[in-house]
Image: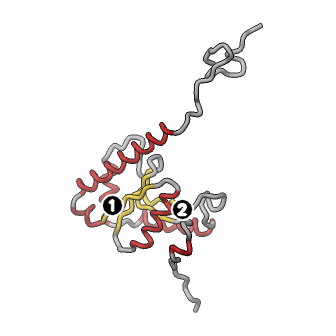
Amino acid sequence: MTDRKTLKLRDESDQDDAAATLNKKGRGWKISEKRLDALHDRARKMRRHPSEAHKALAARFAKEDFGKFKFQKQVVIGSAIMDFASHPLGLAIDIEEADDTELAKRRDKSLAAVGIEVLRLPAQDILDDMEAVMKTVFAAMNARYREKQENRRSRPSTHQRRTDSRGTDVRGTGPREGRERR
């Protein structure tokens, strides 16, 4: 009989702030293809067999109109399977059913390093008071939307007004447009 490998957490002092980073391996993350395939299989099983809290929140999300910010169920992001995620907002929702705070903190740190905020919701709160949970979700969505808007405004625009030597606007002119005919 072979020994099973278990996940062991390294000390934070050993990591030296080495959060998950994007690179060219494993669909953009520093993860092997085999590990990613296993994560996707596990996420698929979780979608097929959801808990009561997952069912309740998914049913409520189906009723809500989020506009262009849809939430997907059981999404693999890096080496984490998040219960719900909205990629355009960079917001992930994790339903807490068990206490594993050390692993959750490290996962949140690695996701924050690539611009994804994690909202943690206790499963019992979802089952007991859905309205309060939805207020929390809407508040987090609004905060992320405002943050994305501010980041967009603070970045220098790549579509600045271009003018020719006479000061005439030449933005949007193709190779044949905007030229003087001789």
Residue closer to the observer: 106 or 134 = 106
Vertically, is 1 above or below 134?
below
Residue closer to the observer: 94 or 62 = 94
User: Residue placed farthest to the top in the image?
Assistant: 182
Position of the N terminus, as image quadrant, is bottom right
Marks 2,1: beta carbons within 8 A: no
Measuring from the top left, give residue 130's x and y in whole percent: 24, 56
Q: Give left or right: position of 46 versus 158.
A: left
Vertically, is 46 above or below 144?
below
Taking the image as drawn, is residue 146 in sight? Answer: yes
Badge 1 crowding class, 10 Å Cα cut-off, few under 14, some 14 to 19, many 20 or more, is some
Measuring from the top left, give residue 115's x and y in whole percent: 49, 53
Q: Quadrant of residue 103?
A: bottom left
Measuring from the top left, give residue 122's x and y in whole percent: 30, 65
The three-letter amino acid code for the residue at tag 2 is Gly
Q: CA distance from mark 2 to mark 1?
A: 24 Å
Q: Give left or right: position of 123 versus 49.
A: left
User: Residue placed farthest to the right in the image?
Assistant: 182
Q: Which mark is residue 126?
A: none
> Label 2, on which residue?
78
Mark closest to the chain's N terminus, 2 or 1:
1
The three-letter amino acid code for the residue at tag 1 is Lys
Q: SS of the residue at dot 2?
A: loop
- The residue shown at (61%, 17%) is 169
Q: What colour scheme was applied to this rendering of the protein?
A: secondary structure
State which mark lies toward you, 2 or 1: 2
Q: Quadrant of residue 22?
A: bottom right
Measuring from the top left, give residue 12's x and y in whole percent: 51, 73
Q: Which mark is residue 55?
A: 1
Residue closer to the observer: 102 or 34 = 102
Residue closer to the observer: 136 or 162 = 162
